[in-house]
Amino acid sequence: MAKKILEAYDIVYLFLKDVLNLDEDIAASEAEKIKLAISDGTINNLAKYVHKVLDLNDLDCDYDVSKEKCRSCKRRTERNLL
């Protein structure tokens, strides 16, 4: 469960910082607030959107935050995305 919460934080943070171009401190603060309130379905869709917008389409592997293998996927960790 803790890993899933951290994953949600990372995805929301990337979205706020790199897609919406928020300041790092603001993005971190907002991601901290959002991470516990966001549903698995929403975080899955947000992750796919972030990957697409940041041109990380090679990671389009049917991502699901509920699956341990997705959080530790070699393709994701090699690129140090989240």
Image: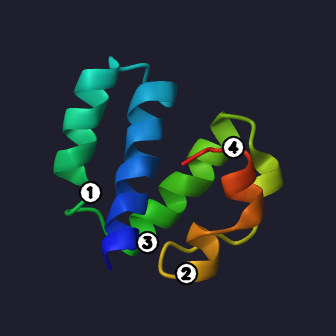
Residue at which label 3 appears: 41
Which residue is painted at 49% across and 53% down in the image? 46
Disc 3 residue type? Gly
The answer to whether residue 68 is above or below residue 44 is below
Q: Say left or right for 72 vs 39.
A: right
Q: Which mark sits nearer the N-terminus, 4 or 2?
A: 4
x, y percent for residue 6: 36, 60
Determine contact: label 3, label 2, CB under 8 Å: no
What element does badge 1 sit on? loop
> Which amino acid, by three-letter code, is at mark 1?
Lys
**Mark 4 surroundings within 10 Å by alpha-carbon count, few (fewer than 14), some (14 through 19), many (20 or more):** some
* Residue underneath mark 2: 68
Residue at position x 55%, y 81% from top?
68
Toward the viewer: 76 or 51?
76
At label 2, the amino acid type is Glu
Tell me which amino acid carries mark 4. Lys
Which circle's residue, 4 or 1, is located before the other in the chain? 1
For marks 4 and 2, give the CA distance: 21 Å
* Residue under the point 72% across and 45% down: 79
Which numbered disc, 2 or 1, marks the residue that appears first in the sequence? 1
Task: Name the disc covering residue 35, or none.
Answer: 1
* Mark 3 → mark 2, Cα distance in angstroms: 15 Å
Q: Is residue 73 left or right of residue 68?
A: right
The label nearer to you, 4 versus 1, is: 1
Give the answer, above or below, for where 58 lies relative to 22: below
Q: Mark 1: few, some, or many residues within 10 Å (few <14, many ≥20)?
A: many
* Vertical relation: 38 (above or below) 40: above
Which residue does the numbered mark 4 point to in the structure image? 52
Of labels 2 and 1, the one closer to you: 2
Q: Are marks 4 and 1 in contact (CB under 8 Å)?
A: no
Looking at this view, is 65 or 41 the one in front? 65
Residue 56 in percent (x, y) is at: 74, 43
